[in-house]
Image (cartoon, rainbow, N blue to C red):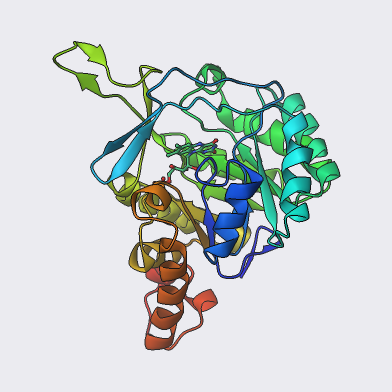
Amino acid sequence: MIVGRVRVEPPVMNASGVVAASAAGALKVEGAGAGAVVTKTFTLRPRRGNKAPMVVPYLGGLINSVGLANPGIGGIREYVEEYRRLGGSLPIIVSIGGETPEEFGELAIAATDAGADAVELNMSCPNVSWTASWEDIASIVKESVAAAKAAGIPVWVKLGFGKGLLREVKAAVDSGADAVVLINTLPAMLIDVWAMKPVLGGVTGGLSGPPIRPIAVKAVWDAYREFGDSIDIVGVGGVDGWEAAAEFILAGAKAVQVGAALSVVGLDVIREIADGLLSYSKKVGRPLEELVGAVHRGLP
Ligand SMILES: Cc1cc2nc3c(=O)[nH]c(=O)nc-3n(C[C@H](O)[C@H](O)[C@H](O)COP(=O)(O)O)c2cc1C
């Protein structure tokens, strides 16, 4: 499948921040049968992230308050070079987190120079202060995509679920982004009633895994219904097997990313999804490409 101008075959990747936070982790994702790897989000400056605990299990998924811990822009080249040196051969999607459109531009140039195949603009992390301070995300999306596109490689935009989602997707379409990645974790919090304290070191965090899947499927469905084939969609949120992946594809996604399930179920889930999608497409007698968005059309 060609997704956002990148060949992703099979159309299954890890989600940013899960397993492939290092080049060694990316190799594990490759070994598990993914069609591309997505890096942890890189910001301009190094970030230590929040206090422990950063990740806690919840209803078959996770709540995390990692807070984009990463080595900063210099880590991008190191990551890509190390992955290639160790024999990694999949397309690399470098996730970047700018605080401003200019920073997205700078990070995209670093990713391009390092040999990345695409950048994924993380515009939706609930665990950092700047995304919360953006009053008009749609206009920031527009400016950031324009800045990142100047670097030359495909630009994917990762958005979070919210009232303004379709305006943000429209901004991505209008500014020529190659794909939208829907969705990020949902803002969440857990309280320890005996300690009378928040459970997470970062106080609040982001919910992922099966509890968010119906919300993510609806986000994909909404975006496909509104924009059809004018932009490629990558579905992410609670994919824990081929059937969940098929839901996203029928709703309009060309590929899926898997986050929480890689640690809750295990890396083998990638191959189960890839094989399961293939046999599903054979059983219904349609190539996967024809199944993208099929729920909007209904199959004869
Ligand atoms: C531990 C953890 C770390 C994450 N780090 C990032 C990150 O650095 N950048 C990003 O865009 N999303 C990050 N995410 C969000 C995932 O990429 C994904 O959008 C979300 O978890 C929903 O997918 P899932 O339900 O399959 O986990 C992280 C998620 C988890 C659980």
Front residue of 222/106: it is 106
Front residue of 122/203: it is 203
Considering only vertical position in the picture, is 254 above or below 26?
below
Report whether 1 appears left or right of 82: left
**Residue farthest along the left direction in this orientation:** 194
- Please tell me which residue is depicted at 47% across the width and 62% down the height of the picture: 252
Q: Report x, y in % for residue 68.
A: 55, 28
Q: Report x, y in % for residue 299.
A: 38, 80
- Please tell me which residue is depicted at 51% across the width and 82% down the height of the picture: 287
Place residue 47 in its image quadrant: top right
Report whether 130 appears left or right of 294: right
Q: Quadrant of the C terminus?
A: bottom left
Q: Quadrant of the N terminus?
A: bottom right
Q: Report x, y in % for residue 262.
A: 42, 52
- Please tell me which residue is depicted at 74% across the width and 47% down the height of the picture: 82
**Residue farthest along the top direction in this orientation:** 196
- Can see residue 232? no
Considering only vertical position in the picture, is 41 above or below 252?
above
Considering only vertical position in the picture, is 202 above or below 122?
above
Q: How many marks?
A: 0
- Can see residue 147? yes
Place residue 244 in its image quadrant: bottom left
- Please tell me which residue is depicted at 45% across the width and 58% down the height of the picture: 267
Report whether 295 appears left or right of 90: left
Q: Report x, y in % for residue 236.
A: 45, 51
